[in-house]
Image: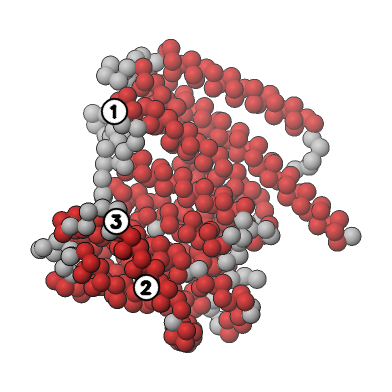
Amino acid sequence: MALLSNTAVLLGKELRTEFRSRELLTTTVVFILTIVVLFSFTFDPSVSESRRFGPGLLWLAFLFAASLMLQPCFLREQTNDTLSALRLSVNDPFAIFLAKLAANTLFMLFTQILLLPVFSILYNVPVLAAFPQLVLVMFMGSLGLSVTGTALSAISAQARMRELLLPLLLLPLLTPVLIASTEATAALLVPNPIMPWKWLGFLTGFDVVFLTALWLFGEYLLEV
Amino acid sequence: MGLGEDNGMKKNILIAFAVVLLMGVAAYASLFVAPTESKMGPIQRIFYLHAPAGMVSLLCFFVCFVGNFAYVLKRESKWDWLGVSAAEVGVAFCTVNIITGPIWAHPVWGIWWTWDWRLTLTFVLWLLYISYLLLRTLVEDPDRRALVSAIYGIFAFLDVPLVYGSIRWWRTQHPQPVIMGGSGSGLEPTMAKVFWFWFFNLVVLMVFLVRERYRLEAMRGDVQLLEREAEAA
């Protein structure tokens, strides 16, 4: 129970920090928008082509955005050594990870839900028919991005060249998330969408595996 | 492990010589003993290097995972040394596998590369362990480096079955497993002998390389320790 209440307090702190400046969300939204626009020059964005390439494009943009957005996650705790303060204030360091990854999942999901209609309009892909299902896929995908991303952000924060290192460590690890999310999204963007249970189950598996790994090994990353 | 072991050096040269000799015998066997494959012709002989190299690289990554896991639990430098040694040798074998693949594929499939699940998986695996080695070069403090890279190594290894599963569900072109691939598969007996001989050889080579790399890493560790002591004194 202490874990949950600690996490809730820390999550509140993460959200407050972000909503005071909204720097992370604004830059991420603009970044994804830029990629989505630039992608339109790389293929013929007609309705049928967009259905084929759209889901992959969208998730690739999300992946790139995540690898940038997760950068400050642990880095900003280093500036005033607030990480030590956090470590002292909770009895289970997993709460720190849990709060950060919950915040990152929410930020990711927020940007995705914000940008899905924009994508839909720009590429003529109707998304309203399966909107709740799409949100579910996005949630599971974002969770996968955030769980691994938060852990690796704690790793890269301790290295040199961290801005370059995080995408390098994170992106190959996210191959399964990219495939599963893209396939699941593609299944929902066709005229008669069917629920992609297979891929949703796969995403759940990914999330569970890495959440467990983070729970087991995460605390070692916060050792000083 | 001490620094000035002259006998160890001589022994190593002998072992290295034996390994080279074994590799020579294996090369001879694959070129002259094994029969020519009826459909693919001589190019099929590259398979004796290609497939075992891939298998041995997987073995290395498993050893790396064991090292990583043990380091996190026990915090003894030797496990870190094992981890980095196995990862480096694994990347080397994986590179051999990735390079020999297209050499075989071009005449047989007519293309150098295809995004089939086995090829894709190997490539992703290669990238994951390159990242692991890269991460190690970017963390200064030895204990920090050992710990964070061990945890990344564990994450990377856990990712392997997931990458496998996701790609497997998604596409396929590579020839079905010839070794232990169920009924109807299987090698001609001489080919099988040559194949397993190659596999055995590459495992010997792997053990030799990992051991040498481990000794090097251990020496580096010793030097670092001495430097620290010298600074403190």
> Amino acid under label 3?
Phe
> Amino acid under label 2?
Val
* Circle 1 residue: B110
* Alpha carbons under labels 3 and 2: distance apart: 20 Å
Q: Earlier in the sequence, mark 3 or mark 2?
A: 2
Q: State which mark lies toward you, 3 or 2.
A: 3
* Circle 3 residue: A41
Task: Identify which residue, A90 or A140, lies in the foreground.
Answer: A140
The quadrant of the picture occupied by the N terminus of chain B is top right
Both marks 1 and 3 on one chain: no
> Amino acid under label 1?
Gly
Query: Mark 1: few, some, or many residues within 10 Å (few <14, many ≥20)?
Result: few
Is mark 2 in CB contact (under 8 Å) with mark 1? no
Horizontal side of B194 relative to B106 (left or right) equals right
Residue B229 position (above or below residue B198): below
* Circle 2 residue: A29
Query: Does residue A84 show up?
Result: no
Q: Pinpoint the chain carrying mark 2.
A: A
Which percent across, then down, holds residue A163? Answer: 54, 63
- Residue shown at 11% from the left, 63% from the top: A191
* Alpha carbons under labels 2 and 1: distance apart: 44 Å
Quadrant position of residue A60:
bottom left
- Residue shown at 41% from the left, 47% from the top: B124
Q: Pinpoint the chain carrying mark 1.
A: B
In the current view of this chain or complex, which residue is farthest to the left? A192
